[in-house]
Image (cartoon, rainbow, N blue to C red):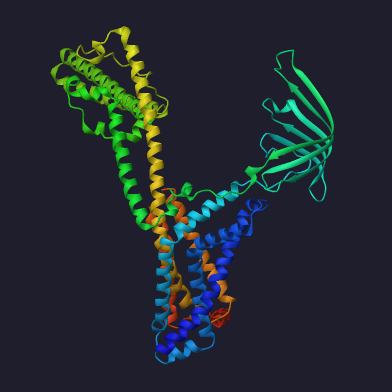
């Protein structure tokens, strides 16, 4: 078995090495394609570009490893299946899982190496590449003055060139505005010709203007004693400072406080400290919110009944406090229903009183033998009229269900309680107290909104650190997951080379990349947890790998063209027989 293990490992190492470097090259070119505009015209030397490529390639290795493992496993088992070596191994009684075992161990070693690399090397590479990229992007072009357009990239100067010669040193129809302590439009120069070239140390731009005029206005514009100067010249020399255009490397400490620059131990410490900080912020927020309502400190002495704890529960009542409109609508509906019930009870009491009066009159005037018949007729008549009135009232209520207002219902004015809060305050001070209470409530609400936004931002920052912690493990495990897909898939399709395996590898890698990217985006938006978002691609692809392994162990014809051709023939024969 050792010979077979060596055979399969040797067959795997070659395609893995080739596909790894090809994949890494494609990812680097994709990165440069996105940032090519920020690299052109910056006067960068070859050493700076090679250094950036070195750091960026190290940062892209964890993403290149899963694709290279998938493609190389597909090619290895596809070549063995195409040359019937896999059939010979199975006929010798060796199962597919036993034949996959050495490559599974190799893939596990690659996954472990990817984890260690992303934990210890990637943070440093991200720090160096991010700092260098920021310096390149912020660097100004060495010299890029276009024809017919004012260029204000040079400090205290604005230059417009009508035409440039092929060597870019001879210029025609030049206009230069210069800021010499006063307004720029008060000091400008016009020349027909000129020659410009940078100095040897690249710090200054030496320009020699020929055949032109210089216009300058000195003094305060509001004063009539201003001086106007016009100076003609045959040759005029000017020196412009372009030292800020030179590319300079900044310190790495500017980007050190970023979750991508930490290893797992540092991420654990940061997550723990940020969790404690967020908990303290929430607790202080609740205490400060209740401290603004100073009347609650004396609730036992002011109120006769104890204030329930549900009123002081911030988390339970935050939604109602932030949106009090719903509560006001609910209170208005409750008052309307109470007024209707009270009106119905008054109407029913009046009808019962009328009925009793009729019964007493009938008893007094009629003989005894006619009392029972009169009472029965009266009760029948009253029941009929009550039914008709209730039906009409229901129709009116149903037609005006949504238009009845609280003000339209007459309610008796309640008597004031001499022990109430309003009775203790004079009429002249009530409006002032109400305005002060409303202003306090508005201040508390604005403070709540500000603190809520602060807590939300802190939670998002904490979520980013958790995402980076899970990403280091998820990308390493992706090597094993994609190997479990690639090995059985190669044994099923039985095609080697870069044709068919490349197509299937791209399809499954796109599924992996899009699902993982979508899960990470959901986690950043706080829609799902960091664990669910970063491991979503693993949850999706592991069942696919198990299914393909089961099909490969049972010699499935899942991707066999002849199998589907035979099924098509059988299906057409059955249709013809039925016809």
**Quarter in which the N terminus is drawn:** bottom left
**In the depicted structure, whether residue 122 falls above or below residue 88:** above
Q: Percent from the top left, x then y, of residue 333?
A: 35, 27
Pick the residue in front: 231 or 528: 231
Q: Percent from the top left, x then y, of residue 424?
A: 23, 11
Q: Percent from the top left, x then y, of residue 48?
A: 59, 57
- Name the residue furthest left: 368
- Name the residue furthest front: 200
Residue 276 location, quadrant: top left
Pick the residue in front: 475 or 315: 475
Q: Is residue 99 visible?
A: yes
* Residue located 40% across and 73% down the image: 108
Tell me: 431 left or right of 567.
left
**In the depicted structure, whether residue 512 falls above or below residue 372:** below
Q: Is residue 557 visible?
A: no
* Residue located 50% across and 49% down the image: 251
**In the depicted structure, whether residue 71 falls above or below residue 378:** below
Pick the residue in front: 256 or 180: 180
Tell me: 12 left or right of 453.
right
Pick the residue in front: 351 or 179: 179
Q: Percent from the top left, x then y, of residue 537?
A: 44, 62
* Residue located 41% across and 61% down the image: 120
**In the depicted structure, whether residue 507 falls above or below residue 232:** below
* Residue located 71% across and 18% down the image: 219
């Amino acid at each position: 078995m050792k010979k077979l293990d060596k055979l399969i490992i040797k067959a795997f190492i070659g395609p893995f090495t080739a596909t790894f470097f090809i994949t890494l090259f494609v990812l680097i070119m994709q990165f440069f394609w996105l940032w090519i505009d920020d690299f052109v015209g910056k006067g960068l030397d070859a050493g700076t570009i090679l250094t950036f490529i070195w750091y960026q390639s190290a940062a892209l290795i964890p993403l290149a490893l899963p694709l290279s493992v998938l493609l190389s496993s597909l090619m290895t088992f596809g070549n063995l299946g195409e040359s019937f070596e896999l059939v010979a191994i199975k006929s010798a009684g060796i199962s597919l899982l036993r034949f996959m075992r050495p490559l599974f161990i190799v893939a596990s070693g690659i996954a472990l190496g990817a984890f260690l690399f992303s934990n210890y090397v990637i943070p440093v590479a991200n720090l160096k590449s991010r700092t260098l990229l920021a310096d390149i992007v912020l660097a100004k072009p060495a010299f890029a003055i276009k024809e017919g357009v004012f260029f204000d990239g040079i400090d205290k100067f604005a230059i417009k060139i009508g035409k440039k010669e092929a060597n870019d040193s001879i210029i025609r129809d030049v206009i230069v505005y210069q800021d010499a302590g006063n307004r720029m439009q008060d000091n400008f120069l016009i020349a027909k010709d000129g020659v410009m070239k940078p100095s040897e140390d690249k710090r200054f731009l030496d320009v020699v203007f020929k055949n032109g005029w210089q216009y300058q206005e000195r003094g305060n514009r509001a004063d009539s004693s201003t001086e106007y100067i016009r100076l003609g010249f045959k040759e005029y020399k000017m020196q412009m400072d372009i030292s800020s255009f030179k590319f300079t490397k900044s310190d790495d400490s500017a980007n050190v406080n970023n979750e991508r620059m930490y290893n797992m131990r540092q991420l654990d410490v940061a997550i723990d400290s940020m969790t404690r900080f967020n908990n303290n912020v929430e607790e202080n927020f609740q205490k400060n919110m209740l401290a603004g309502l100073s009347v609650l400190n004396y609730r036992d002495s002011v109120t006769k009944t104890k204030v329930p704890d549900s009123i002081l529960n911030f988390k339970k009542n935050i939604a109602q406090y932030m949106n009090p409109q719903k509560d006001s609508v609910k209170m208005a509906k409750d008052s309307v229903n109470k007024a209707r019930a009270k009106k119905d009870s008054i109407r029913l009491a009046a009808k019962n009183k009328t009925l009793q009066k009729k019964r007493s009159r009938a008893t007094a005037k009629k003989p005894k033998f006619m009392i029972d018949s009169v009472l029965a007729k009266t009760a029948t008549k009253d029941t009929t009229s009550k039914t008709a009135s209730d039906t009409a009232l229901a129709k009116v209520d149903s037609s005006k269900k949504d238009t009845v207002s609280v003000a339209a219902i007459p309610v008796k004015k309640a008597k004031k309680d001499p022990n109430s809060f309003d009775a203790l305050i004079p009429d002249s001070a009530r409006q002032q107290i109400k305005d002060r209470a409303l202003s306090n409530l508005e201040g508390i609400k604005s403070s709540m909104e500000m603190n809520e936004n602060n807590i939300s931002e802190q939670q998002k920052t904490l979520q980013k650190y958790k995402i980076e912690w899970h990403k280091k493990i998820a990308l390493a495990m992706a090597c094993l997951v994609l190997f479990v897909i690639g090995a059985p898939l190669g044994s099923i399709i039985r095609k080697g080379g870069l044709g068919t395996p490349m197509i299937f590898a791209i399809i499954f890698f796109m599924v992996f990349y899009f699902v993982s990217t979508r899960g990470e985006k959901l986690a950043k938006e706080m829609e799902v947890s960091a664990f669910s978002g970063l491991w979503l691609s693993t949850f999706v692809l592991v069942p696919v790998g198990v299914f393909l392994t089961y099909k490969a162990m049972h010699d499935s014809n899942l991707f066999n063209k002849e199998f589907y051709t035979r099924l098509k023939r059988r299906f057409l024969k059955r249709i013809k027989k039925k016809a």
